[in-house]
Protein backbone atom coordinates (compact mmCIF):
# COMPACT_ATOMS: atom_id res chain seq x y z
CA UNK A 1 0.00 0.00 0.00
CA UNK A 2 1.57 3.28 -1.09
CA UNK A 3 1.22 6.55 0.64
CA UNK A 4 -1.12 8.80 -1.35
CA UNK A 5 -0.84 12.51 -2.09
CA UNK A 6 -3.19 14.94 -0.41
CA UNK A 7 -5.70 14.87 -3.24
CA UNK A 8 -6.17 11.14 -2.95
CA UNK A 9 -5.81 10.68 0.75
CA UNK A 10 -9.07 10.09 2.54
CA UNK A 11 -9.91 10.05 6.17
CA UNK A 12 -12.12 8.64 8.81
CA UNK A 13 -15.46 10.43 9.09
CA UNK A 14 -16.81 11.69 12.36
CA UNK A 15 -19.54 9.12 12.19
CA UNK A 16 -17.15 6.27 11.65
CA UNK A 17 -14.48 6.57 14.33
CA UNK A 18 -15.49 4.40 17.28
CA UNK A 19 -12.52 4.04 19.55
CA UNK A 20 -8.77 4.15 19.86
CA UNK A 21 -8.62 0.75 19.24
CA UNK A 22 -10.49 1.04 16.10
CA UNK A 23 -8.80 3.96 14.31
CA UNK A 24 -9.21 3.35 10.61
CA UNK A 25 -8.15 4.72 7.23
CA UNK A 26 -8.49 4.34 3.45
CA UNK A 27 -8.03 6.23 0.23
CA UNK A 28 -10.06 6.55 -2.93
CA UNK A 29 -11.81 8.99 -5.21
CA UNK A 30 -14.95 7.02 -6.05
CA UNK A 31 -17.28 8.76 -8.44
CA UNK A 32 -20.45 6.73 -8.05
CA UNK A 33 -22.63 5.11 -5.44
CA UNK A 34 -21.44 1.68 -6.44
CA UNK A 35 -19.22 -0.26 -4.08
CA UNK A 36 -15.55 0.30 -4.72
CA UNK A 37 -14.04 -2.27 -7.08
CA UNK A 38 -11.85 -4.83 -5.44
CA UNK A 39 -8.22 -4.24 -6.30
CA UNK A 40 -4.74 -4.94 -5.06
CA UNK A 41 -5.20 -8.70 -4.98
CA UNK A 42 -6.41 -11.15 -7.60
CA UNK A 43 -8.24 -13.01 -4.85
CA UNK A 44 -10.74 -10.16 -4.52
CA UNK A 45 -11.60 -10.24 -8.21
CA UNK A 46 -11.89 -13.99 -8.27
CA UNK A 47 -14.02 -14.00 -5.13
CA UNK A 48 -16.46 -11.51 -6.57
CA UNK A 49 -16.65 -12.84 -10.12
CA UNK A 50 -15.61 -16.48 -10.22
CA UNK A 51 -18.30 -19.04 -10.94
CA UNK A 52 -19.21 -21.59 -8.33
CA UNK A 53 -19.50 -21.29 -4.60
CA UNK A 54 -16.99 -19.28 -2.61
CA UNK A 55 -15.00 -21.00 0.12
CA UNK A 56 -16.55 -20.49 3.55
CA UNK A 57 -14.69 -19.17 6.61
CA UNK A 58 -15.67 -17.99 10.07
CA UNK A 59 -14.48 -14.65 11.48
CA UNK A 60 -14.95 -13.15 14.94
CA UNK A 61 -16.43 -9.69 15.34
CA UNK A 62 -16.83 -7.70 18.54
CA UNK A 63 -20.42 -7.32 19.69
CA UNK A 64 -20.64 -3.94 21.42
CA UNK A 65 -24.47 -3.81 21.37
CA UNK A 66 -24.19 -0.64 19.30
CA UNK A 67 -26.02 -1.55 16.08
CA UNK A 68 -28.87 0.97 15.69
CA UNK A 69 -32.47 -0.19 15.55
CA UNK A 70 -33.44 -1.16 12.05
CA UNK A 71 -29.86 -1.96 10.98
CA UNK A 72 -29.98 -5.63 11.98
CA UNK A 73 -27.38 -7.32 14.19
CA UNK A 74 -23.60 -7.25 14.29
CA UNK A 75 -23.54 -10.52 12.34
CA UNK A 76 -26.33 -9.72 9.85
CA UNK A 77 -26.55 -6.20 8.50
CA UNK A 78 -25.88 -4.05 5.45
CA UNK A 79 -22.11 -4.39 5.86
CA UNK A 80 -21.94 -8.14 6.45
CA UNK A 81 -24.10 -8.51 3.35
CA UNK A 82 -21.83 -6.21 1.36
CA UNK A 83 -18.76 -8.10 2.56
CA UNK A 84 -20.24 -11.41 1.51
CA UNK A 85 -21.23 -10.00 -1.85
CA UNK A 86 -17.81 -8.58 -2.66
CA UNK A 87 -15.25 -10.64 -0.73
CA UNK A 88 -13.49 -13.64 -2.26
CA UNK A 89 -14.96 -15.86 0.47
CA UNK A 90 -18.26 -16.46 2.22
CA UNK A 91 -17.94 -15.19 5.79
CA UNK A 92 -19.89 -16.34 8.81
CA UNK A 93 -19.36 -13.75 11.51
CA UNK A 94 -19.12 -15.05 15.08
CA UNK A 95 -20.12 -12.48 17.75
CA UNK A 96 -17.79 -11.95 20.68
CA UNK A 97 -18.74 -9.61 23.56
CA UNK A 98 -16.17 -6.81 23.62
CA UNK A 99 -15.95 -6.56 27.40
CA UNK A 100 -15.48 -10.32 27.91
CA UNK A 101 -13.80 -11.27 24.65
CA UNK A 102 -11.01 -13.43 26.05
CA UNK A 103 -13.42 -15.37 28.25
CA UNK A 104 -15.65 -16.01 25.23
CA UNK A 105 -12.71 -17.09 23.08
CA UNK A 106 -11.58 -19.50 25.81
CA UNK A 107 -15.03 -21.14 25.82
CA UNK A 108 -15.04 -21.41 22.03
CA UNK A 109 -11.55 -22.89 21.87
CA UNK A 110 -12.44 -25.41 24.57
CA UNK A 111 -15.53 -26.50 22.64
CA UNK A 112 -13.81 -26.55 19.25
CA UNK A 113 -15.99 -23.70 17.97
CA UNK A 114 -13.47 -20.85 17.75
CA UNK A 115 -13.59 -19.03 14.38
CA UNK A 116 -11.00 -19.41 11.64
CA UNK A 117 -9.87 -15.77 11.87
CA UNK A 118 -9.45 -14.45 15.41
CA UNK A 119 -9.83 -10.66 15.66
CA UNK A 120 -8.69 -9.56 19.13
CA UNK A 121 -6.99 -6.44 20.49
CA UNK A 122 -5.56 -8.02 23.65
CA UNK A 123 -1.98 -8.84 22.65
CA UNK A 124 -1.14 -10.75 25.80
CA UNK A 125 -4.06 -13.08 25.09
CA UNK A 126 -3.18 -13.74 21.45
CA UNK A 127 0.43 -14.42 22.49
CA UNK A 128 -0.97 -16.89 24.99
CA UNK A 129 -2.84 -18.59 22.13
CA UNK A 130 0.44 -18.80 20.22
CA UNK A 131 2.22 -20.35 23.19
CA UNK A 132 -0.48 -23.04 23.40
CA UNK A 133 -0.42 -23.83 19.68
CA UNK A 134 -4.00 -22.65 19.24
CA UNK A 135 -3.05 -20.32 16.37
CA UNK A 136 -0.67 -21.05 13.51
CA UNK A 137 2.62 -19.49 12.33
CA UNK A 138 1.90 -17.33 9.29
CA UNK A 139 5.24 -17.01 7.50
CA UNK A 140 4.63 -19.83 5.05
CA UNK A 141 0.91 -19.13 4.39
CA UNK A 142 1.58 -15.45 3.77
CA UNK A 143 4.44 -16.24 1.42
CA UNK A 144 2.38 -18.84 -0.43
CA UNK A 145 -1.08 -17.29 -0.62
CA UNK A 146 -0.86 -13.53 0.00
CA UNK A 147 -0.25 -10.65 -2.38
CA UNK A 148 -1.48 -7.39 -0.81
CA UNK A 149 -0.63 -8.08 2.81
CA UNK A 150 2.73 -9.62 1.85
CA UNK A 151 3.60 -6.46 -0.06
CA UNK A 152 2.61 -4.36 2.96
CA UNK A 153 4.94 -6.40 5.20
CA UNK A 154 7.87 -5.94 2.85
CA UNK A 155 7.30 -2.19 2.74
CA UNK A 156 6.92 -1.95 6.54
CA UNK A 157 9.43 -4.26 8.24
CA UNK A 158 8.53 -2.87 11.67
CA UNK A 159 5.21 -4.71 11.36
CA UNK A 160 7.03 -7.93 10.52
CA UNK A 161 9.09 -7.53 13.68
CA UNK A 162 6.16 -6.65 15.94
CA UNK A 163 4.07 -9.63 14.82
CA UNK A 164 6.70 -12.19 15.82
CA UNK A 165 6.40 -14.67 18.65
CA UNK A 166 9.35 -16.94 19.43
CA UNK A 167 10.94 -16.00 16.11
CA UNK A 168 7.90 -16.75 13.94
CA UNK A 169 5.10 -14.58 12.57
CA UNK A 170 1.84 -15.41 14.35
CA UNK A 171 -0.21 -12.22 13.90
CA UNK A 172 -1.52 -9.81 11.28
CA UNK A 173 -0.59 -6.22 12.04
CA UNK A 174 -1.21 -2.68 10.90
CA UNK A 175 0.14 0.86 11.15
CA UNK A 176 -1.86 3.61 12.83
CA UNK A 177 -1.14 7.27 13.49
CA UNK A 178 0.56 7.85 16.83
CA UNK A 179 -2.18 9.86 18.54
CA UNK A 180 -3.71 10.26 22.00
CA UNK A 181 -6.25 7.72 23.19
CA UNK A 182 -6.71 8.00 26.96
CA UNK A 183 -7.03 11.53 28.26
CA UNK A 184 -7.80 13.65 31.31
CA UNK A 185 -9.94 16.78 31.08
CA UNK A 186 -10.27 19.39 33.80
CA UNK A 187 -12.84 22.12 34.36
CA UNK A 188 -10.79 25.20 33.54
CA UNK A 189 -13.68 27.46 34.63
CA UNK A 190 -13.60 25.82 38.07
CA UNK A 191 -9.87 26.46 38.33
CA UNK A 192 -10.44 30.11 37.45
CA UNK A 193 -13.30 30.53 39.91
CA UNK A 194 -11.25 29.07 42.76
CA UNK A 195 -8.15 30.98 41.62
CA UNK A 196 -6.16 27.79 41.12
CA UNK A 197 -3.40 27.05 38.64
CA UNK A 198 -3.42 24.00 36.38
CA UNK A 199 -1.98 21.16 38.52
CA UNK A 200 1.44 20.14 37.23
CA UNK A 201 2.56 17.66 39.90
CA UNK A 202 0.85 14.78 41.66
CA UNK A 203 0.70 16.79 44.90
CA UNK A 204 -0.93 19.72 43.10
CA UNK A 205 -3.34 17.26 41.50
CA UNK A 206 -4.39 16.03 44.96
CA UNK A 207 -4.87 19.55 46.26
CA UNK A 208 -6.89 20.55 43.20
CA UNK A 209 -9.15 17.51 43.61
CA UNK A 210 -9.72 18.47 47.23
CA UNK A 211 -10.59 22.03 46.28
CA UNK A 212 -13.08 20.88 43.64
CA UNK A 213 -14.72 18.70 46.28
CA UNK A 214 -14.84 21.15 49.18
CA UNK A 215 -15.10 24.69 47.77
CA UNK A 216 -18.38 24.63 45.79
CA UNK A 217 -16.87 25.26 42.33
CA UNK A 218 -20.27 25.15 40.60
CA UNK A 219 -21.58 27.87 42.91
CA UNK A 220 -24.87 26.23 43.85
CA UNK A 221 -24.28 26.52 47.58
CA UNK A 222 -24.16 22.77 48.06
CA UNK A 223 -21.33 20.35 48.67
CA UNK A 224 -22.30 18.08 45.78
CA UNK A 225 -19.24 18.03 43.52
CA UNK A 226 -16.41 15.52 43.26
CA UNK A 227 -12.81 16.31 42.44
CA UNK A 228 -11.71 13.45 40.24
CA UNK A 229 -11.72 9.70 39.49
CA UNK A 230 -9.07 6.99 39.52
CA UNK A 231 -8.78 7.03 35.73
CA UNK A 232 -5.16 7.02 34.54
CA UNK A 233 -3.66 7.48 38.02
CA UNK A 234 -1.37 4.53 37.18
CA UNK A 235 0.15 6.45 34.27
CA UNK A 236 1.33 9.20 36.60
CA UNK A 237 3.92 6.67 37.80
CA UNK A 238 4.69 4.68 34.61
CA UNK A 239 2.69 1.73 35.95
CA UNK A 240 0.73 -0.77 33.83
CA UNK A 241 -2.91 -0.96 35.01
CA UNK A 242 -3.57 -4.04 32.85
CA UNK A 243 -0.97 -6.19 34.58
CA UNK A 244 -0.77 -4.38 37.94
CA UNK A 245 3.00 -4.23 37.50
CA UNK A 246 5.85 -2.11 36.26
CA UNK A 247 8.66 -3.86 34.40
CA UNK A 248 11.27 -1.32 33.40
CA UNK A 249 14.74 -1.17 31.91
CA UNK A 250 17.49 -0.54 34.45
CA UNK A 251 21.10 -0.80 33.25
CA UNK A 252 19.83 -2.76 30.25
CA UNK A 253 18.12 -5.25 32.53
CA UNK A 254 14.34 -5.80 32.52
CA UNK A 255 13.24 -5.76 36.15
CA UNK A 256 10.08 -5.39 38.23
CA UNK A 257 9.55 -2.15 40.16
CA UNK A 258 7.46 -2.31 43.33
CA UNK A 259 7.92 1.36 44.18
CA UNK A 260 5.67 2.39 41.28
CA UNK A 261 2.85 0.24 42.66
CA UNK A 262 3.26 1.78 46.10
CA UNK A 263 3.03 5.29 44.65
CA UNK A 264 -0.17 4.43 42.76
CA UNK A 265 -1.90 2.96 45.80
CA UNK A 266 -0.74 5.81 48.01
CA UNK A 267 -2.21 8.41 45.64
CA UNK A 268 -5.50 6.55 45.28
CA UNK A 269 -5.79 6.17 49.06
CA UNK A 270 -5.19 9.88 49.60
CA UNK A 271 -7.83 10.77 47.00
CA UNK A 272 -10.30 8.30 48.50
CA UNK A 273 -9.71 9.33 52.10
CA UNK A 274 -10.17 12.99 51.14
CA UNK A 275 -13.57 12.21 49.60
CA UNK A 276 -12.52 13.46 46.16
CA UNK A 277 -13.79 10.34 44.37
CA UNK A 278 -17.13 8.54 44.50
CA UNK A 279 -17.17 6.24 47.53
CA UNK A 280 -18.48 3.43 45.28
CA UNK A 281 -15.84 4.00 42.63
CA UNK A 282 -14.73 0.36 42.55
CA UNK A 283 -18.28 -0.67 41.65
CA UNK A 284 -18.27 1.63 38.62
CA UNK A 285 -16.41 -0.88 36.46
CA UNK A 286 -17.55 0.55 33.10
CA UNK A 287 -17.10 4.19 34.11
CA UNK A 288 -20.77 4.96 33.38
CA UNK A 289 -21.41 6.66 36.73
CA UNK A 290 -18.25 8.75 36.41
CA UNK A 291 -19.22 9.85 32.91
CA UNK A 292 -22.68 10.79 34.15
CA UNK A 293 -21.18 12.94 36.92
CA UNK A 294 -18.94 14.67 34.37
CA UNK A 295 -21.61 15.51 31.79
CA UNK A 296 -23.95 16.64 34.57
CA UNK A 297 -21.35 19.14 35.78
CA UNK A 298 -20.59 17.46 39.09
CA UNK A 299 -17.01 16.30 38.45
CA UNK A 300 -13.88 18.43 38.19
CA UNK A 301 -11.44 16.05 36.46
CA UNK A 302 -12.63 13.36 34.05
CA UNK A 303 -10.74 10.63 32.22
CA UNK A 304 -11.68 8.29 29.41
CA UNK A 305 -10.47 7.00 26.04
CA UNK A 306 -10.97 7.79 22.33
CA UNK A 307 -10.06 11.46 22.46
CA UNK A 308 -9.80 11.61 18.67
CA UNK A 309 -13.05 9.87 17.90
CA UNK A 310 -16.80 9.82 18.19
CA UNK A 311 -16.82 8.61 21.79
CA UNK A 312 -14.70 11.46 23.11
CA UNK A 313 -16.56 14.01 21.00
CA UNK A 314 -19.97 12.73 22.10
CA UNK A 315 -19.08 12.98 25.80
CA UNK A 316 -17.89 16.55 25.28
CA UNK A 317 -21.02 17.38 23.27
CA UNK A 318 -23.26 16.15 26.11
CA UNK A 319 -21.25 18.06 28.70
CA UNK A 320 -21.66 21.30 26.75
CA UNK A 321 -25.35 20.65 26.14
CA UNK A 322 -25.95 20.24 29.87
CA UNK A 323 -23.46 22.95 30.91
CA UNK A 324 -23.14 25.52 28.09
CA UNK A 325 -20.77 27.73 30.06
CA UNK A 326 -18.39 24.90 31.01
CA UNK A 327 -14.80 25.48 29.91
CA UNK A 328 -12.50 22.47 29.86
CA UNK A 329 -8.94 21.72 28.87
CA UNK A 330 -6.85 18.58 28.40
CA UNK A 331 -4.72 17.95 31.47
CA UNK A 332 -1.20 16.56 30.98
CA UNK A 333 -0.32 13.66 33.25
CA UNK A 334 1.07 15.39 36.36
CA UNK A 335 4.75 14.94 37.12
CA UNK A 336 5.58 12.43 39.85
CA UNK A 337 8.78 11.56 41.67
CA UNK A 338 9.55 9.18 38.78
CA UNK A 339 9.07 11.69 35.97
CA UNK A 340 6.28 12.70 33.61
CA UNK A 341 4.66 10.16 31.32
CA UNK A 342 2.01 9.58 28.70
CA UNK A 343 -1.27 7.74 29.22
CA UNK A 344 -2.33 4.90 26.94
CA UNK A 345 -2.06 6.11 23.35
CA UNK A 346 -3.10 4.87 19.94
CA UNK A 347 0.31 3.43 19.25
CA UNK A 348 1.41 3.16 15.62
CA UNK A 349 2.27 -0.53 15.64
CA UNK A 350 -0.59 -2.88 16.35
CA UNK A 351 -1.40 -6.54 15.80
CA UNK A 352 -4.89 -7.83 16.30
CA UNK A 353 -5.62 -10.89 14.15
CA UNK A 354 -4.51 -14.52 13.94
CA UNK A 355 -5.56 -17.78 12.30
CA UNK A 356 -7.01 -20.62 14.33
CA UNK A 357 -4.92 -23.80 14.25
CA UNK A 358 -8.07 -25.76 13.35
CA UNK A 359 -8.94 -23.61 10.32
CA UNK A 360 -9.66 -25.96 7.42
CA UNK A 361 -8.93 -23.51 4.61
CA UNK A 362 -5.98 -21.29 5.52
CA UNK A 363 -5.67 -20.07 1.93
CA UNK A 364 -9.21 -18.71 2.02
CA UNK A 365 -8.49 -16.86 5.26
CA UNK A 366 -5.37 -15.29 3.77
CA UNK A 367 -7.30 -14.22 0.68
CA UNK A 368 -9.90 -12.58 2.91
CA UNK A 369 -7.17 -10.68 4.79
CA UNK A 370 -5.74 -9.51 1.47
CA UNK A 371 -9.17 -8.26 0.44
CA UNK A 372 -9.69 -6.50 3.78
CA UNK A 373 -6.43 -4.54 3.53
CA UNK A 374 -6.96 -3.41 -0.05
CA UNK A 375 -7.53 0.33 -0.24
CA UNK A 376 -10.83 0.02 -2.06
CA UNK A 377 -12.33 -2.30 0.53
CA UNK A 378 -11.27 -0.05 3.36
CA UNK A 379 -12.70 2.98 1.58
CA UNK A 380 -16.17 1.51 1.15
CA UNK A 381 -16.41 0.12 4.67
CA UNK A 382 -15.26 3.39 6.17
CA UNK A 383 -17.02 5.98 4.04
CA UNK A 384 -19.90 4.20 2.36
CA UNK A 385 -20.71 5.52 -1.10
CA UNK A 386 -19.84 8.84 -2.63
CA UNK A 387 -22.92 10.93 -3.23
CA UNK A 388 -24.85 8.96 -0.64
CA UNK A 389 -22.71 9.09 2.50
CA UNK A 390 -20.01 11.59 1.59
CA UNK A 391 -18.80 14.14 -0.91
CA UNK A 392 -15.22 15.06 -1.69
CA UNK A 393 -13.95 18.46 -0.53
CA UNK A 394 -10.33 19.47 -0.91
CA UNK A 395 -9.38 15.87 -1.53
CA UNK A 396 -11.09 14.55 1.61
CA UNK A 397 -14.51 12.97 2.14
CA UNK A 398 -17.02 15.08 4.08
CA UNK A 399 -20.25 13.62 5.47
CA UNK A 400 -23.36 14.63 3.57
CA UNK A 401 -25.74 13.78 6.39
CA UNK A 402 -24.14 13.14 9.78
CA UNK A 403 -27.34 11.60 11.17
CA UNK A 404 -27.56 9.15 8.28
CA UNK A 405 -23.91 8.19 8.64
CA UNK A 406 -24.29 7.74 12.37
CA UNK A 407 -27.07 5.24 11.79
CA UNK A 408 -25.55 3.43 8.83
CA UNK A 409 -21.79 3.67 9.35
CA UNK A 410 -20.76 4.66 12.86
CA UNK A 411 -20.88 1.13 14.27
CA UNK A 412 -19.03 -0.85 11.59
CA UNK A 413 -15.44 -0.18 12.69
CA UNK A 414 -14.78 -3.70 13.96
CA UNK A 415 -14.92 -5.04 10.40
CA UNK A 416 -11.91 -2.82 9.72
CA UNK A 417 -9.44 -3.93 12.36
CA UNK A 418 -6.68 -4.35 9.79
CA UNK A 419 -6.91 -0.91 8.20
CA UNK A 420 -3.65 1.06 7.89
CA UNK A 421 -4.45 4.68 8.73
CA UNK A 422 -0.83 5.71 9.20
CA UNK A 423 -0.09 5.38 5.50
CA UNK A 424 -2.36 8.31 4.74
CA UNK A 425 -1.97 12.03 5.21
CA UNK A 426 -3.80 14.67 7.22
CA UNK A 427 -7.15 13.68 5.75
CA UNK A 428 -7.01 10.56 7.90
CA UNK A 429 -7.24 12.60 11.09
CA UNK A 430 -10.49 12.81 13.04
CA UNK A 431 -10.21 16.57 13.38
CA UNK A 432 -10.42 16.88 9.58
CA UNK A 433 -14.04 15.82 9.82
CA UNK A 434 -14.93 18.60 12.25
CA UNK A 435 -16.21 21.95 11.04
CA UNK A 436 -14.19 24.88 12.44
CA UNK A 437 -17.13 27.16 11.64
CA UNK A 438 -19.20 25.39 14.31
CA UNK A 439 -18.35 26.58 17.84
CA UNK A 440 -18.54 23.10 19.37
CA UNK A 441 -16.33 21.55 16.70
CA UNK A 442 -13.85 24.42 16.91
CA UNK A 443 -13.58 23.97 20.66
CA UNK A 444 -13.07 20.23 20.36
CA UNK A 445 -10.40 20.68 17.71
CA UNK A 446 -8.46 22.73 20.27
CA UNK A 447 -8.81 19.89 22.78
CA UNK A 448 -7.38 17.46 20.24
CA UNK A 449 -4.42 19.78 19.71
CA UNK A 450 -3.93 19.99 23.46
CA UNK A 451 -4.07 16.19 23.75
CA UNK A 452 -1.36 15.68 21.16
CA UNK A 453 0.87 18.28 22.77
CA UNK A 454 0.34 16.82 26.24
CA UNK A 455 0.61 13.11 25.52
CA UNK A 456 2.52 12.36 22.31
CA UNK A 457 6.12 13.36 22.91
CA UNK A 458 9.38 11.50 23.48
CA UNK A 459 9.76 13.69 26.57
CA UNK A 460 6.82 11.81 28.13
CA UNK A 461 7.50 8.08 27.70
CA UNK A 462 4.87 5.36 27.62
CA UNK A 463 4.23 3.12 30.61
CA UNK A 464 5.61 0.09 28.73
CA UNK A 465 9.18 0.47 27.53
CA UNK A 466 9.61 -2.72 25.50
CA UNK A 467 7.41 -5.27 23.77
CA UNK A 468 8.87 -8.74 24.26
CA UNK A 469 7.99 -11.36 21.62
CA UNK A 470 7.29 -14.01 24.24
CA UNK A 471 4.60 -14.64 26.80
CA UNK A 472 4.46 -16.61 30.01
CA UNK A 473 4.29 -20.40 29.68
CA UNK A 474 1.21 -22.11 31.11
CA UNK A 475 2.62 -22.84 34.55
CA UNK A 476 3.76 -19.25 35.08
CA UNK A 477 0.55 -17.90 33.58
CA UNK A 478 -1.47 -19.75 36.21
CA UNK A 479 0.75 -18.31 38.94
CA UNK A 480 0.47 -14.81 37.48
CA UNK A 481 -3.33 -14.82 37.10
CA UNK A 482 -3.89 -16.24 40.56
CA UNK A 483 -1.58 -13.87 42.40
CA UNK A 484 -2.85 -10.91 40.34
CA UNK A 485 -6.32 -11.44 41.82
CA UNK A 486 -4.82 -11.62 45.30
CA UNK A 487 -2.81 -8.44 44.81
CA UNK A 488 -5.83 -6.64 43.33
CA UNK A 489 -7.78 -7.38 46.49
CA UNK A 490 -4.88 -6.23 48.67
CA UNK A 491 -4.57 -2.92 46.82
CA UNK A 492 -8.32 -2.31 46.91
CA UNK A 493 -8.40 -3.01 50.63
CA UNK A 494 -5.57 -0.55 51.16
CA UNK A 495 -7.38 2.22 49.27
CA UNK A 496 -10.69 1.90 51.12
CA UNK A 497 -9.38 0.58 54.46
CA UNK A 498 -8.65 3.91 56.09
CA UNK A 499 -6.09 3.96 58.89
CA UNK A 500 -6.74 0.32 59.73
CA UNK A 501 -4.78 -0.89 56.68
CA UNK A 502 -1.80 1.19 55.60
CA UNK A 503 -0.09 1.37 52.23
CA UNK A 504 3.12 0.05 53.77
CA UNK A 505 1.30 -3.00 55.12
CA UNK A 506 -0.43 -3.54 51.79
CA UNK A 507 2.86 -3.49 49.92
CA UNK A 508 4.39 -5.94 52.37
CA UNK A 509 1.40 -8.25 51.93
CA UNK A 510 1.49 -7.92 48.14
CA UNK A 511 5.20 -8.69 47.92
CA UNK A 512 4.82 -11.64 50.29
CA UNK A 513 1.96 -12.98 48.17
CA UNK A 514 4.09 -12.58 45.04
CA UNK A 515 7.01 -14.44 46.57
CA UNK A 516 4.90 -17.24 48.02
CA UNK A 517 3.12 -17.78 44.70
CA UNK A 518 6.41 -18.13 42.83
CA UNK A 519 6.53 -14.64 41.38
CA UNK A 520 10.32 -14.68 41.18
CA UNK A 521 10.02 -17.27 38.41
CA UNK A 522 7.96 -14.73 36.45
CA UNK A 523 10.47 -11.95 37.08
CA UNK A 524 13.30 -14.23 35.98
CA UNK A 525 11.37 -15.27 32.86
CA UNK A 526 10.87 -11.68 31.72
CA UNK A 527 14.47 -10.74 32.48
CA UNK A 528 15.77 -13.69 30.50
CA UNK A 529 13.32 -13.14 27.64
CA UNK A 530 14.52 -9.58 27.21
CA UNK A 531 18.20 -10.51 27.29
CA UNK A 532 17.85 -13.42 24.86
CA UNK A 533 15.49 -11.74 22.37
CA UNK A 534 16.90 -8.24 21.97
CA UNK A 535 16.96 -8.51 18.19
CA UNK A 536 13.19 -9.03 18.14
CA UNK A 537 12.27 -6.63 20.95
CA UNK A 538 10.28 -3.53 19.95
CA UNK A 539 11.25 -0.44 21.95
CA UNK A 540 8.29 1.88 22.45
CA UNK A 541 10.58 4.91 22.32
CA UNK A 542 10.86 4.17 18.60
CA UNK A 543 7.12 4.78 18.18
CA UNK A 544 7.83 8.49 18.04
CA UNK A 545 9.34 8.00 14.60
CA UNK A 546 5.76 7.54 13.41
CA UNK A 547 4.37 10.79 14.80
CA UNK A 548 2.29 12.64 12.26
CA UNK A 549 3.78 16.03 11.52
Image (cartoon, rainbow, N blue to C red):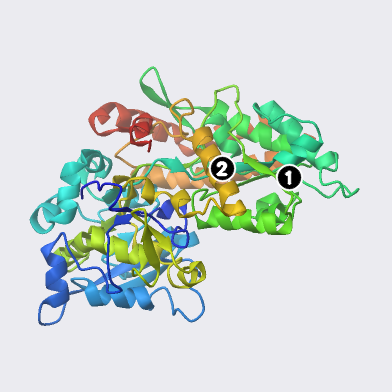
Q: Is residue 224 above or below residue 507?
A: below
Q: Which residue occupies 17% across, 75% down?
A: 48
Crowding at label 2, few (<14), some or many (≥20) Cα neighbours within 10 Å? some
Q: Can I make out residue 500 in this image?
A: no
Q: Which residue occupies 68% across, 30% down?
A: 199
Q: Which residue occupies 15% across, 73% down?
A: 47
Q: Is residue 99 above or below residue 236?
A: below
Identify the residue at the far right of this view: 221
Q: Is residue 322 above or below residue 305?
A: below
User: What x and y, as percent, mark residue 258?
Assistant: 54, 28
Give left or right: position of 153 versus 192: left
Q: What SS does tag 2 mark?
A: helix
Label placed on residue 446: 2
The alpha-carbon separation of the residues under discs 2 and 1 comes to 28 Å
Label placed on residue 277: 1
- Name the quarter where the C terminus is drawn: top left
**Could you say which is closer to the camera, residue 134 or residue 366?**
366
**Could you say which is closer to the camera, residue 42 or residue 342?**
42
Amino acid sequence: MKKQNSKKAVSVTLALLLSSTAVLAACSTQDSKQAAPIAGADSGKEGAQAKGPKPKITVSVYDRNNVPEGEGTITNNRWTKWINEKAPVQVEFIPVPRTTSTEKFNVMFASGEAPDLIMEFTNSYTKELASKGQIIPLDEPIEKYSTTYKKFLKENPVIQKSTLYNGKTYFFGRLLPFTPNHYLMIRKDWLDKLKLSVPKTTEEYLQTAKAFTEQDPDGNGKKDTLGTTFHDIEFFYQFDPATLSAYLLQNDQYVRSWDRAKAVIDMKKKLYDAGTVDKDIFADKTGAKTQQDWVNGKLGIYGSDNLEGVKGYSVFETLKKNNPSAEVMVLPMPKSEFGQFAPATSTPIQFNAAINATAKNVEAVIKYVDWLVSEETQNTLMFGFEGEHYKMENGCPKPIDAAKNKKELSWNGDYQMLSNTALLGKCAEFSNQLDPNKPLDKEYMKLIEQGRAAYVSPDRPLHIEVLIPQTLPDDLLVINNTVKNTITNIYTKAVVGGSSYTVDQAMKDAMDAWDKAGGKKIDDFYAKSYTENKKDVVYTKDFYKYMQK
